[in-house]
Amino acid sequence: MANPILRQKLAAGEFMVIPGVQDMIATVMTNKVGFDIIYGTGYWLTASSLGLPDAGIATYTQMVDRMRTITRTSKAALIADADTGYGGLLNVHHTVRGYEEAGVTAIQIEDQEFPKKCGHTPFKRCVPTADMVEKIKVASEAREDKENFLIIARTDARAGLGMDDAMRRMEAYAEAGADILFFEAPQSEDEMRRACEAFDLPMMANMADGGKTPILPAEVLKEIGYSLAIFPAMTSLVAAAAMEKSLRHLKQAGTSLSPDIPMTDFNEFCELIGFQEVWDFEKRWAR
């Protein structure tokens, strides 16, 4: 059974701020801070694990393994990026079953052609609406826990086909059985409001730092009509900036120590990553 917390919060009308995680260190830190829902981001998991761009290069097998590792590491429910479903309708069926078995709470599927591109980069192309409708129907039917495992339908039509096409697609995806709608890369607050006002289904905002969509605070997103917002890029971009700063300091000063560079305590991190369990085992069984 999928973690019911996302469904419960949607039913209660509780707005959700959800960080993206790119690796298990970020996942462990969301445990420490106390987030109860996190987002497994395709862009940043691909960048972190493969050192490659989010351009349809990562496979289903690689991504489902990554999601399984996150759910093993995290105390939170996981919303997981599944790109286009990694192929045709049979692939979508297999992807939904695999992600659900891996412990995912909600799966996000988009209407791009394969190979897909990051939603905030150029040269995206969308499949016909009817093709995506079939994917949503297959995904809805494939899940075992139809109450708590949710289907998020994303449209990338805004960039290449325009706002009106994106709106028509979301209407079709809602009718096909999507639980949450994801209008990718709106370019203004007015577009965000138009989309939210048109649909009764929960709407998910993508607060991708550096992307096409304005970054707005939670209270504004809620007022616009969103039910949840993912922040997929934040932890990765912050971590990259911190690593660059520390590396430059090491190169110039020849030491890791600096009053200007915050560093998590090593002993604390040992506990966060699970060493206490290892030490307890050693105390019991070491000869």
Image (cartoon, helix red, strand yellow):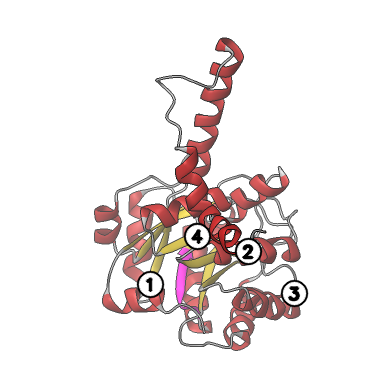
Count of numbered circles on the image: 4
Query: Dot 3, crowdedness within 10 Å: few (<14), some or many (≥20)?
Result: some
Can you identify the residue that label 4 sits on? 39
182 relative position to 114: left or right: left
Dot placed on the residue nearer the N-terminal end, 3 or 4: 4
Q: Residues within 10 Å of mark 2 (few under 14, many from 20)?
A: few
Residue 73 is left or right of residue 181, and the answer is right
Return the x and y of residue 36 as percentages of the image width and height: 39, 64
- Say if 242 sits above or below 84 in the image: above
Query: Is residue 79 on the magenta stretch?
Result: no
Tag 1 secondary structure: loop
When asked about the image quadrant of residue 192, the answer is bottom left
Sequence-earlier tag: 2 or 3: 3
Spatial distance from mark 4 to mark 2, Cα to Cα? Answer: 38 Å
Give residue 255's position: percent from left, percent from top.
56, 17
Which secondary structure type mostly characterizes the magenta part of the structure? Answer: strand
Q: Amino acid at mark 1?
A: Pro
Q: Type of residue at label 2?
A: Trp
As measured in the structure, the alpha-carbon distance from the residue carrying label 3 to the one carrying label 4 is 24 Å
* Mark 1 vs mark 3, CA separation in Å: 26 Å
What element does badge 3 sit on?
loop
The tag earlier along the polypeptide, 4 or 2, is 4
- Are the residues tagged 1 and 3 within 8 Å (C-beta)? no
Q: Using the image, determine if residue 64 lies above or below residue 214.
A: below
Residue 88: numbered disc? 3
- Look at the image and tell me whether residue 82 can be seen: no
Which numbered disc, 1 or 2, marks the residue that appears first in the sequence?
1
Which residue position holds label 1? 202
